């Protein structure tokens, strides 16, 4: 007789949707919005032309919006039980006394349709709900719903609501629970689990180090902790400055004390730029240095102009970067003024825009 040695299964395990998904904010928020959409869509159709058969119109809308596929969302018993309980409970939410009578009636249509369309007699069998838990105060308000529809525009709904209530009451569908103030339903409130996108739990630096490789979650926590530490260090640590720059900034700040921050920054910029341009003035430097200075400034001007033209290419022909007096055209004129005697941009070209370089059009 041959003996078959044990071996791992070739098939992978099936993915099962956990019941707490249906009580989480991800599902609850989306389902509440879908119920609101269902009610508003029916209201739009109803107000345009009141139908002779309101419930037939509702069934058509129910199928059109895809609610008929709701029962095929999950097949496992535990998550399916939670799905059915949550859907019925959210429909009951829209039938409290504080809601408008029209909203309460359409929510009853939805509750009734969803409950009675549960698949039965399937193979394999699917879990189905036999009773709907409801707080006793909501049950009393639900029984009085028919009387709240004694209005002309809601009168066509009244016989349908009365018929649906009689079917549910005769079938003993509702399972009475203590009043809603005691929060007797399970879970006590919805959503029970709140999903926070992008949230990372803080890392305890004093916690003992785990054995083995760090998990992906641990790596994310560690990276976030390092990033926070770096941000704090950058905030608390001033950037290093050379002695010359520090003394220049200090003198500029003292000279401009009492001015606004914009004026202070402008003064500092003008002082620094003037110091640099004076240092590379071709008229006050040797010939070799003057040639190098001119080449450096020329390259800087061409680089600025090319980048602006490249950026302008991303815009449409009707939308350019400024007009003739402020846009790329002025920068180009300022670049052309570089080295021209008696021009504003003689020394810096585009670096002298603040002083008025490029304003004069040829």
Image (cartoon, rainbow, N blue to C red):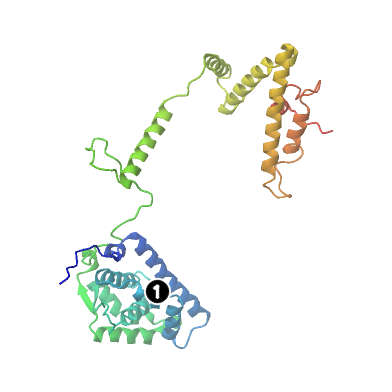
Image side of residue 267 versus residue 212, left or right = right
Q: State whether residue 358 appears in this view.
A: no
Name the residue at 70% across, 40% down.
Answer: 309
Q: Splitting the image into 4 quarters, where does residue 94 fall?
A: bottom left
Q: Position of residue 19 (x, y in %)?
A: 27, 65
Image height check: is 264 above or below 117? above
Q: Secondary structure at mark 1?
A: helix
Q: Splitting the image into 4 quarters, where does residue 40 fall?
A: bottom left
| Frontmost residue, 56 versus 209 | 209
Q: Position of residue 44 (x, y in %)?
A: 50, 75
Q: Quadrant of the N terminus?
A: bottom left
Image height check: is 36 above or below 61? above
Q: Which residue is mark 1?
A: 103
Image side of residue 247 versus residue 190, left or right = right
Q: Position of residue 47 (x, y in %)?
A: 50, 78
Crowd band around label 1 with a 10 angstrom C-alpha radius: few (<14), some (14–19), many (20+): some
| Frontmost residue, 325 versus 310 | 310
* Tag count: 1
Q: Position of residue 66 (x, y in %)?
A: 43, 75
Q: Residue furthest front?
A: 1
Q: Quadrant of the C terminus?
A: top right
Name the residue at 55% across, 21% down.
Answer: 258
Name the residue at 24% across, 81% down.
Answer: 173
Q: Splitting the image into 4 quarters, where does residue 249 fall?
A: top right
Name the residue at 43% across, 84% down.
Answer: 54
Image side of residue 58 versus residue 348, left or right = left
| Frontmost residue, 65 versus 6 | 6
Q: Residue furthest left?
A: 1
Q: State whether residue 81 appears in this view.
A: yes
Image height check: is 59 above or below 287? below
């Amino acid at each position: 007789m041959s003996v078959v040695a044990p071996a791992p299964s070739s098939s992978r395990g099936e993915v099962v949707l956990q019941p707490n998904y249906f009580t989480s904010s991800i599902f609850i928020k989306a389902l509440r919005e879908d119920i609101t959409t269902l009610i508003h869509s029916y209201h739009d159709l109803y107000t345009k032309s009141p139908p002779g058969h309101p419930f037939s119109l509702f069934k058509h809308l129910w199928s059109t919006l895809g609610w008929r596929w709701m029962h095929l969302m999950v097949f496992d018993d535990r998550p399916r039980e939670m799905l059915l309980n949550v859907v019925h409970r959210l429909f009951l939410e829209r039938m409290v006394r504080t809601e408008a009578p029209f909203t309460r009636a359409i929510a009853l249509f939805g509750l009734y349709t969803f409950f009675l369309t549960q698949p039965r007699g399937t193979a394999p069998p699917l879990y189905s709900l036999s009773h709907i838990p409801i707080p006793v105060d909501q049950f009393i308000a639900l029984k009085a719903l028919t009387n709240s529809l004694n209005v002309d525009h809601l009168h066509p709904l009244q016989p349908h609501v009365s018929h649906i209530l009689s079917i549910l009451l005769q079938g003993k569908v509702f399972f009475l629970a203590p009043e809603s103030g005691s929060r007797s339903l399970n879970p006590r409130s919805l959503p029970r689990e709140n999903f926070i996108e992008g949230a990372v739990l803080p890392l305890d630096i004093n916690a003992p180090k785990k054995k083995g490789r760090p998990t992906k979650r641990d790596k994310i926590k560690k990276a976030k902790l390092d990033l926070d530490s770096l941000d704090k260090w950058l905030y608390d640590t001033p950037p290093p400055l050379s002695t010359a720059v520090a003394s220049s900034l200090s003198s500029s700040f003292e000279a401009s004390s009492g001015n606004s921050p914009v004026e202070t920054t402008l003064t500092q910029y003008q002082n620094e730029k003037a110091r640099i341009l004076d240092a590379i003035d071709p008229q006050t430097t040797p010939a070799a240095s003057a040639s190098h200075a001119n080449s450096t400034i020329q390259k800087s001007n061409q680089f600025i102009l090319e980048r602006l033209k490249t950026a302008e290419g991303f815009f449409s022909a009707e939308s350019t970067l400024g007009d003739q007096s402020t846009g790329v055209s002025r920068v180009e004129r300022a670049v052309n003024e570089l080295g021209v005697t008696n021009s504003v941009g003689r020394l810096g070209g585009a670096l002298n825009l603040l002083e008025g370089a490029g304003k004069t059009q040829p």
